[in-house]
Structure formats: structure tokens, C-alpha cells
Amino acid sequence: MNTKWGKIIIGAVLLIGFVIFTQYEKNAEPAWKVNTENFTVLDSWEELMNFEKMKYNDLKFVDHFNLFKNSDISVPLSNEHRTLRIEKTWNNGFQLYVLYSVDLKERDKDEGDVPSLNVEKIKLTSKQSKDFLGIAELYPGETSSEGYVFKHRLYRSMMIHPEFNNAVNSQEDWEEVMKSNRFELNDITMNSKKGVTNLKPIAFQVEPAQIVGLPKAIESIPVNQTLLVNNGDEIRLKNMEFYQIGSRIMLDKKVDKDLVSLLGEVNVNDRKHTIEYEIESINEAEDYIQAYSLMSELLNSDQSDKGTFSITHSVHRSKNDYSFSVPKIDLEKYNANQAEGVRKNELVVNENDVKVVYEGLYWDNANNQGGIKFSLETLPKQDSLEEEFLYPRPSYHFGEGNMDRYVRNIVAVKNSAGKQLEDYDIAKIFNDGKSSFLIYFYNGLPAEDLSVSLSNLTHIEPLKNKVVVPLKLPPAKK
């Protein structure tokens, strides 16, 4: 063999051997065993992520659709002779999940010996390079798990919510905040029994929240079912789409704005519960059904579970307004003897399958409060649906011009000067057979003539056809 080529071949073999050896050294685990009495030791990455999904329920969605971002951030901790590694991150617009690890030493007796990451502040930077510095609120999760050891590294995680403490007030600033595509952790320390180590800021590029228009779909599965509504409308359910952190069912057209929602049932392994599907508008040509509850059901079911969801009823809103008076003389009588109350039986509404009766002034012992009592019923009653989905709302929950599909069964109270009041709320009363409600005031009933008006009253109708759809997730992304 030519001496020159022999040297080249020998050099190449040595180089390959060196690379293999250094990679082995890099990936090889230490020979000593971790004490399983003091540490939770896991055998696989899948097991580690299963623990994390129990800790933060949102991660079931994130893991299924492979939305985690791998990180190459590594920070030497020289005084500890260790390395902090950011392993994975995820955000959905206004929260940031961080999974990190620190190498374990044979001398470590428990988790307190291993430095843990703490973040005090977080800076969000919008696409327009505008900065917003807030407090980092750390959500601990839904389990008591702190850390897990995998391949001689201790893994911990945090879910960070920025808190601006009223520093961001204008609508324009909030929209800017929600468009942030860079999150920077500030005032970072690594804390252990040895003390505190200050670290430089750590920044991540993130996907900003989509607050205008329809969030981009990640996956979609066909539905292809048609609803026949009692008002004569025919609505096709096109497909179920999964997006950043939710799901929706797309409709083939705009629907009557006074058709505010649909009702139905989820059935998983013969476990049934009723749900409401809110209808939302996208643009001038398209509507969709919000399906958060279906998403939650899917993520909390095993793959072997058999499930369906159905749509059985529609909820319609009336265009009419109604009102009744509460005279000052009755309020004075009630205030003189609250236990006896002032009984009325005044029919306010009895049309469009809706019945409202002003019951009088009443003290509710269960809630330890008194107020204006009225009943609200849809006729004929729809089994338990009325009890579950018929609810009035104070008018002050909605601003002017915000007449979207959430506006229903609105109760407004005005004083003798015609001023609309806002110091009241509405509670349900459970001591009679009707759907009764109490308008109670935070500072007691005003001693003056009052007028109560009701608008956007809804009633429930069965669909001409019951629609049943298999409940399933699209295949997991690898």
C-alpha cells in the first residue's frame, strides 16, 4: 500500500474513533445509581411527558399535535459544576411553558441539593419591537410533583403567566401585547442549599396569539352532517378543526343571528352529560360552533374509549323587550319586614314559549340575601335542559354595541330617574320547583321606584333531526 494513502486511512480511522468516543462520553450515563427513595426516577422520556401532562392538562393537546419546541439553550453553573439545559418550550399566546433540566451529582441527597430555576419578571416584545415588562406568575400545576430524574438529570417545569398589574390599560396596548413574538425571562436565579446564582436573561421566539380572524387550523376531521332547525333553516356541519388550543365545528353558511347556540350531549363509554355549543361569527359569510368542551373530553379520554357527541336542540332569542315595576311603597314594606317579604304573582311575559313572572320581594335564607324575585321558564319544559342552560345575566356585563351571540336573557334595572344601575347581580333560588332568580343589590335594595326590563329572552326548541357524530381525535403528529 502506498505510504501516503496508508497514513490517510489510519488518520481517518483514528478521527472516526475519536468522534465515536467523544459522542459516547457525551451521552453515556454515570455508573452510580440514583437513590429512588429520595428521587422520582423515570425509565423513559414518554413516562416523563406523561407526568408533565398530568401536571398541566393543556400539554395533552400540545403533545398530541407535536407543538413543543426543542431548545438548544444551555447555561453553565460554574459555582455548582453543573449545567442548566432548557429542554422544551410551548406557548399559546399568553402563557409560556418551560421544561428544564440540571445534571444530578452522586453527592445529591434530595431535590433541595439540585439548583432550581426561579423567574421574577418576564418581558414580552411585540412584532413592532414594543416591550412590555411584567411579573412572572408561576402556575404550579395540578399535581404535587416537583421533579423527575431521567438519565441522571433532574427535570423540572414551570408555566409562566405574565402579570402587568394594570400597567397595560389601553385596548391598543393589549392588542400589541397579544401579538408578542418574543418572551424574555428576567431576574432569573438558580436556588439551592448552596445559595442563589444570578443568571442573565433568557429569551425565546414564540408564536403570537391570533386575535384577529379565525385561528389557523392545525388538523381537521370531516363531520358532514346536516341540522334541520325548526325555523326552517338547514345547516351543514362541514368539519371539526383543531387550532392553537381549542376546537371548532365549521358551518357551511351564516345562520340567523337570533339562533344563539345549540344543545346536545356527549356520550363516552355510556357516561353522558349535556353541553352547549356556542355559535360564533367569523366574517360576513361564515359561522362556526365553538367546541372547547369536546376538545376537553377528547384529551381526557383514553384512545380505547368509544364516544359520540350529539346535537338535539336549538336556542333562539326573542327580539321583544319586556318590563315590570317595583314601586317604592313595596320596597319600604319589604325593608320593614324582610322575613315576611312582599308577595306578587305578576305575569310579565307569556309568549314565544317563554314565561316570566314577577314573584315579589323575597329573602333567601340559603344565600343570606334579599331582592327582587322572578321566575323564567321555557314552555314546554325540555327535561333538564332548561335548568341547565336557562340563565339571566345583568345588562352591565355587556357594553354598548357588543350585541354578539353571548347576549341573552338580559336583565336591566333602572331607578326613578331612569338611570341604569350596575351595583346588582343575579342568583338562582333552589327552594322551589320553578327556575326562580333573585336580583340582589350589593348595598341593599334602593328605597325608590325601580323598573326591571328583560330583553333577548331565549327559548329552547328540539331539532327536527337528532345529529350524532363520532367523537375522535385526528392521529397524533410525530
Image (cartoon, grey):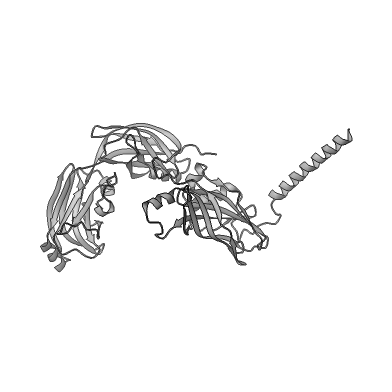
Quadrant in which the C terminus is drawn: top right
Query: Residue 433 in the image: x percent, y percent?
Result: 21, 52
Q: Is residue 104 visible?
A: no
| Residue 314, placed above or below residue 423 | above
In the picture, measured across the screen, residue 3 lies left or right of residue 206, that is: right
User: Quarter of the image holding residue 361?
Assistant: bottom left
> Image point 47% across, 47% down: which residue?
127
> Image point 54% across, 50% down: which residue?
204
| Residue 12, placed above or below residue 438 | above
Q: Is residue 252 visible?
A: yes
In the picture, measured across the screen, residue 462 lies left or right of residue 60, that is: left
Query: Residue 416 in the image: x percent, y percent?
Result: 14, 59
Closest to the observer, 154 or 1: 1
| Residue 115, placed above or below residue 17 | below
Counting every numbered tag in the picture gives 0
In the image as oriented, which residue stretches furthest toward the left? 329
Quadrant in which the N terminus is drawn: top right
Query: Residue 364 in the image: x percent, y percent?
Result: 22, 62
